[in-house]
Image (cartoon, helix red, strand yellow):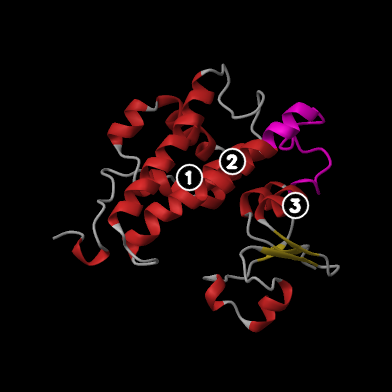
Amino acid sequence: MAFGILYTRPVAKASNLPLDLVTITSSQQAPEEYLKLNPLGKIPTFVGANGFILSECIAIAIYITSQDKTTPLLGSGNTENHASILRWMSFANSEILPSLGGWFNPLIGRSPFVQEEVELNRQATLKRLQIIEDHLAAKTTSYLVGETLSLADLFVAGIIAGAFRFFLDGEWRGAHPACTKWFLHVYEQPIFSDVAGRPVLAEEAMANVPPGKRGE
C-alpha cells in the first residue's frame, strides 16, 4: 500500500516511501474531489493512507522527511540547525517563489503581461538571490545549513531551478559563484538528480517582452 500521495519526490525517494503522484495543473482547474481535500485548491496536498490530510508545501516536506527517524535532512537533532532549515525553506517559499512567478508567468502568458511589473519582480528575485549568494559566500561548507545536505538545500534548489533554467545566464552565474556552485552541487546529489535529471542552465535570460513577440 502506498504511504500516500505527495509532490516532494526527492525527499520521498530518500525516505524510501511508496507514493502515488496525482498531477493538478492549476488551482483554477482543480477537480471537485480535490477541492474537498483543499477548499482553496492550492497545490500540493498530501493524503496519507490512513486518511491524514495535510496542505502547505513546507509542512508536507517536513512531515514526509520526518518519517525517517534517522534522517540528517532535518538537522540531526540540532535545534538551531532545524530552525535554520525552516528559515531557508520559508524564505524561498514566501520571498523567492512569488517574485519569481511574477517574473516568469507573464512572459509565458500564464498571467497578464505588464512590463513594469515584470521588471519589478525581476529585481525583487535577484535581490533575494543575492541574499543566498552572500550567505553561501561567507560559509566554509557547500550547504545552506550546517555541514551536510539538508531539506533546506533540496527545497530551495527546487524552487530556484526555474530561475537557473530561464533567467540566470552565464553573466549572472559568473557574478554569483557561491550560489551557482551550491546549486550545481545540490543537483549532483543522487537524492536530487535521480528525480530531477540534469540541470538546465540558461544561455541568455528570457527577454521582458510579451509572449507573442519573443523571437521576433
Mark 3 or 1, nearer chain start? 3
- Displayed quadrant of residue 41: bottom right
Which percent across, then down, holds residue 216? 13, 60
Q: What stretch is highlighted in magenta?
A: 65-85
The residue pinned by badge 1 equals 160
Residue in view at x 65 percent, y 83 percent: 32
Q: Are marks 2 and 1 in contact (CB under 8 Å)?
A: no
- Work out whether residue 202 can be spotted: yes
Disc 3 packing (10 Å; few <14; some 14–19; many ≥20): many
Under mark 2, the amino acid is: Phe
The residues bearing labels 2 and 3 have C-alpha atoms spaced at a distance of 20 Å
Task: Mark 2 or mark 1: name the one nearer the start of the chain.
Answer: 2
Determine which residue is flagged by label 2. Answer: 91
Quadrant position of residue 73: top right
Residue at (68% x, 35% y) in the render: 85
Q: Is there CB contact under 8 Å for labels 3 and 1?
A: no
Residue at 54% across, 44% down: 95
| Residue with the mark numbered 3 | 64
Q: What residue type is labelled 1?
A: Ile
Q: Is residue 154 visible?
A: no
Q: What residue type is labelled 3?
A: Ile
Q: Does the magenta stretch include residue 75?
A: yes
Camera-nearest label, 2 or 3: 2
